[in-house]
Each structure stands twice: as structure tokens, then as C-alpha cells.
Image (tube, rainbow, N blue to C red):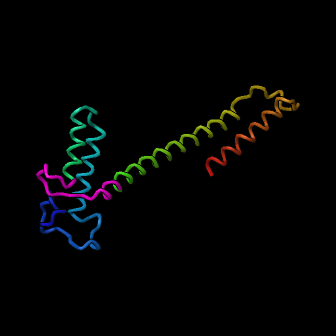
Amino acid sequence: MAKRHEGFTLTDAIVEDVSKLTRDVEQIKFRKDMLSRYFARLLENPYDERMIKYLEYVARIHTDTPTKKSKINVDLIHINSLLGYVEAVLIGDYRAIEAFGKLLWIQNDFFIKFYCNDGAEYLETPTATTTTVARSTQSFFSRLLRYFF
């Protein structure tokens, strides 16, 4: 069994040809399961001394050091790529949620516009104050459009 398959015990299901690897291949499912367990541990456990030791352990077993028992060795570029990808996905989701939250508050502002009648009696006679508000509102909407588009 090749070193890259260490920990994967279904030897008859190993796919050696990279072009035949899919999401449904057992060795990919195995790796996805291990990665899911890793992230679950990061998210569910307290950040204490045991967590620091766990993070060190994960780094040690995936590198080529003489102090480990496993023969697994993942190149640094692949580790960095994975962690960078996961970070980008998480930040992208956060930004999408944040943008949607802003959209909801814009919708809320339009509801307020039609529900609140405060000052309705002054709408017929423009004053310096209403002109200033109109310019400010226009500026706000133009800034809002620039932010989202």
C-alpha cells in the first residue's frame, strides 16, 4: 500500500489513477470523514492546553518528522491550500450573510418610510431642512448602490 493511503484499510477499493478519483470513491470519502472530524473537534472542543496539543499532533503526523509513528507526509503547499480554501469559504459565507442582513435592514427602512407618518404635514412645503434631507438621502442611496454593485 502506498504511503498516501495510510489509514485507509479498504485495499481493494484504492484508486491509483488520479483521473478516476471522484467524490464517491471510498478513499476520498475516508479523507472527507477525517477532515470533518478534525473541523468538528476544532469547533466543539474548548480551546485549552489539550487543544493546543491536538493541533501540534495533527501538524506532526502530517509532516515528515522522525518523531512520529505514521509514514504519512503531506506537502506544505497542499496543507496551505486546504486551510486557505476553507478560510475563503467561511469568510465568503460570512460576507454573504452580512450582505443579506444589510438587505433586510434596507427593507425595514422602506417599511418605516410607509408606516411612519411623522412630519407628513410638512411634506407639501419644502424647507431648507427637507432639501438637505433629500440630498443626504440621495447621497445615501448612491453610496448604497456603489457598495452592493
Q: Residue at x 75, y 26 (%)?
A: 118
- Image coordinates of residue 72 in percent, x first then y, are 18, 57
Q: Is residue 107 left or right of residue 82?
A: right
Q: Is residue 59 above or below residue 24?
A: above
- Image coordinates of residue 119 in percent, x first then y, are 78, 26
Give the main secondary structure of the magenta stretch: loop
Range covered by the magenta-colored residues:
63-80
- Image coordinates of residue 145 in percent, x first then y, are 66, 48
Q: Is residue 106 above or below residue 82?
A: above
Q: How many marks?
A: 0
Q: Is residue 148 left or right of residue 54?
A: right
Q: Is residue 76 above or below residue 135?
A: below
Write down the quadrant of residue 13 in the picture: bottom left
Tell me the quarter of the image containing the N terminus: bottom left
- Image coordinates of residue 33 in percent, x first then y, are 24, 53
Q: Residue at x 35, y 51 (%)?
A: 83
Q: Residue at x 17, y 68 (%)?
A: 14
Q: Is residue 121 above or below residue 134?
A: above
Q: Is residue 136 magenta?
A: no
Q: Is residue 78 magenta?
A: yes
Q: Residue at x 23, y 32 (%)?
A: 49
Q: Is residue 120 left or right of residue 103?
A: right
Write down the quadrant of residue 136 in the picture: top right
